[in-house]
Amino acid sequence: MNRRNATIPTLLSFLTLSLLLLAVAACGGDDDDAAGEATTPATATTAGSGPGTVTLTSSAIEGQAGKILLVFATSGSERVGRVCASITSDEFTLPETIMTEVPEGDDPCGDGTPEAMLAEGTYSLTAGVFVGGQQTAESSTTLSVDVAGNVSAEIDGAALSP
């Protein structure tokens, strides 16, 4: 599977996205501002028990062409997996994409990270649509997924569409 899902075209975009992710991490547990954020159950299938991978897809994300879809899996406050994909059309659907480990450093879309093998348990998946130069997601949604072996989950694209 091609893990090169996104390329940040300029250093400024890279730095802006990095700052954005730091801001999202700092605000991740705050429930005071739920505007634009929906919590939906994951559509997940389990294939056994024990550790596993999470394969993500999405329903259509409309009107967000040219932006970045960034999804983090968290356990408590620790980021344990991610997907970073360029939204390439006005009706973008994320193809089956296995979450990978979060790269070290400031680039959440860095290449060369292996598939994330998550311990059995429940994880929060937060998906956001970002544009360079902004510090917050234009839209976001959160769902939970129970890992028991390899599982699949679908992101609600309508929640990420304007």
Image: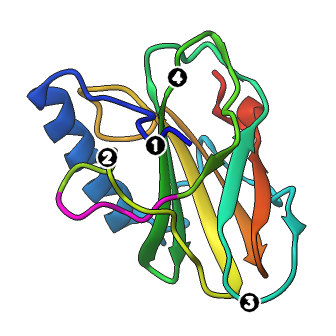
Q: Look at mark 4 in the image and give the residue it sits on.
A: 87
What is the CA distance from the residue labelled 4 to the residue labelled 1? Answer: 15 Å
Up the image or down, 66 lies above or below 17; here it is above
Picture coordinates of residue 149, whole percent (x, y)? 77, 78
Marks 1 and 2, how far apart at CA: 7 Å
Marks 1 & 2, CB-CB < 8 Å contact: yes
- Give the foreground label among 4 and 1: 1
Q: Which tag, 1 or 2, sits closer to the chain's start? A: 1
- Residue located beneath label 2 in the image: 111
Instruction: Check if residue 13 falls in the magenta segment.
Output: no
- SS type, badge 2: loop
Horizontally, is 55 left or right of 100 in the view?
right
| Callout 3 amino acid | Gly
Q: Which of 26 and 129 is in front in this view?
A: 129
Q: Main secondary structure of the magenta part?
A: loop
Q: Name the residue under label 1.
A: 3
Q: What residue does disc 3 label?
A: 50
- For the residues labelled 4 and 2, the Cα–Cα distance comes to 17 Å
From the top left corner, tell me how far across and down residue 34 is, in percent: 59, 53
Q: Nearer the viewer, mark 4 or mark 3?
A: 3
| Circle 3: element type | loop
